Image: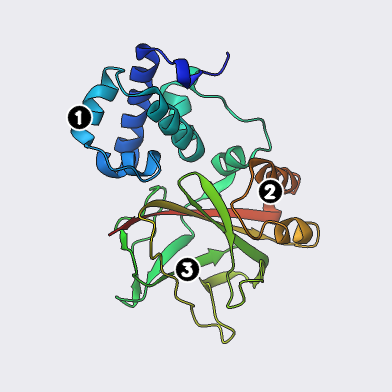
């Protein structure tokens, strides 16, 4: 089936896209205002009137295209269940497909410095139970079944960035043994606090743990810097997918940041 040209999308296509958006909101318990802010690159809209127009297929085509792109980047699994005719499943080896197939939510959780404790582990729930306020200190706790090396990505508004798990931002990869680890960490092993100062909305964090980093080290080091291009993530996904299933693990947590 040909991809939908959202610049020419019919009202029926836009109304069917609304059903996907509603399924995403219901599945991850995301308020309409937060959904539209995340999907429309920070635009603040009236969720009632926008939702009403959207449900009738009257939403602007430009906004429909942005919403489609955001859903495809973040909740393709839900979209393919609700309206597969509107979405294209990426080729095998693609980064998003690899996440869909292999990611786990039960071994990565959030460490809040303000309460000196952990929130409830996310389990299979895609979004952490309590949002994090902008400026609030946080870190992560990873329980790994693999001994090797770890590296991590942050995704916000459809853009992926590599971020360091140590005090040195130039260190893309960090040693990781089996068991519980607090990341990022200082040289003495204690947790290094992170803050999100500016960008509210839904952020996704993916931790990759691999037994043998040698074949991936050069590729991962080349991912530092600006937002990653799809072909860069695709190359990494292909390399990971070529490994035996027990040689790597993908862990994900989604966090809602609020003002």
Comparing labels 2 and 3, the label whose residue is closer to the camera:
3
Can the viewer see residue 96? Answer: yes
Mark seen at residue 49: 1
Q: Nearer the viewer, residue 146 or 90?
A: 90
Comparing labels 3 and 1, the label whose residue is closer to the camera:
1
What residue appears at the point 58 percent right and 45 percent down from the top-left corner? Answer: 102
Q: Position of residue 131 (x, y in %)?
A: 30, 58
SS at circle 1: helix
Relative placement, left or right, of 197 versus 56 is right
SS at circle 3: strand
Comparing labels 2 and 1, the label whose residue is closer to the camera:
1
Q: Position of residue 168 (x, y in %)?
A: 62, 76
Above or below residue 235? Residue 180 is below
Quarter residue 52 falls in:
top left
Q: Position of residue 195 (x, y in %)?
A: 41, 69
- Quadrant where the N terminus sits is top right
- Quadrant where the C terminus sits is bottom left
- The residue lying furthest to the right in this view is 215
Residue, disc 2:
245
**Distance CA(mark 2)–CA(mark 3):** 22 Å
What residue appears at the point 43 percent right and 62 percent down from the top-left corner? Answer: 109
Mark seen at residue 141: 3
Above or below residue 212? Residue 115 is below
What residue appears at the point 38 percent right and 72 percent down from the top-left corner? Answer: 137
């Amino acid at each position: 089936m040909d991809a939908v040209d959202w610049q020419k999308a019919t009202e029926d296509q836009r109304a069917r896209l609304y059903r996907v958006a509603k399924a995403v909101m219901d599945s991850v318990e995301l308020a309409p205002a937060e959904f539209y802010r995340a999907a429309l690159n920070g635009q603040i809209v009236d969720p009632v009137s926008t939702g009403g127009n959207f449900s009738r297929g009257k939403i602007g085509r430009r906004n429909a295209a942005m919403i489609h792109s955001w859903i495809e980047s973040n909740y393709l699994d839900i979209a393919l269940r609700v309206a597969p005719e509107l979405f294209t499943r990426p080729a095998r080896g693609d980064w998003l497909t690899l996440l869909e197939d292999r990611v786990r939510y039960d071994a990565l959780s959030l460490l809040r410095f303000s309460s000196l404790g952990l929130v409830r582990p996310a389990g299979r729930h895609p979004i952490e139970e309590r949002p994090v306020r902008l400026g609030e200190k946080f870190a992560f706790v990873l329980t790994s079944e693999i001994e090797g090396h770890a590296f991590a990505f942050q995704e916000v508004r459809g853009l992926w960035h590599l971020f360091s798990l140590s005090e040195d931002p130039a260190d893309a990869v960090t040693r990781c043994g089996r068991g519980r680890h607090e990341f990022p960490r200082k040289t003495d092993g204690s947790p290094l606090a992170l803050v999100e100062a500016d960008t509210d909305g839904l952020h996704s964090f993916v931790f990759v743990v691999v037994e043998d980093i040698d074949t991936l080290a050069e590729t991962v080091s080349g991912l530092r810097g600006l937002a990653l291009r799809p072909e860069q993530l695709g190359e990494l996904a292909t390399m990971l997918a070529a490994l035996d299933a027990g040689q790597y693990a993908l862990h994900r947590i989604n966090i809602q940041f609020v003002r």
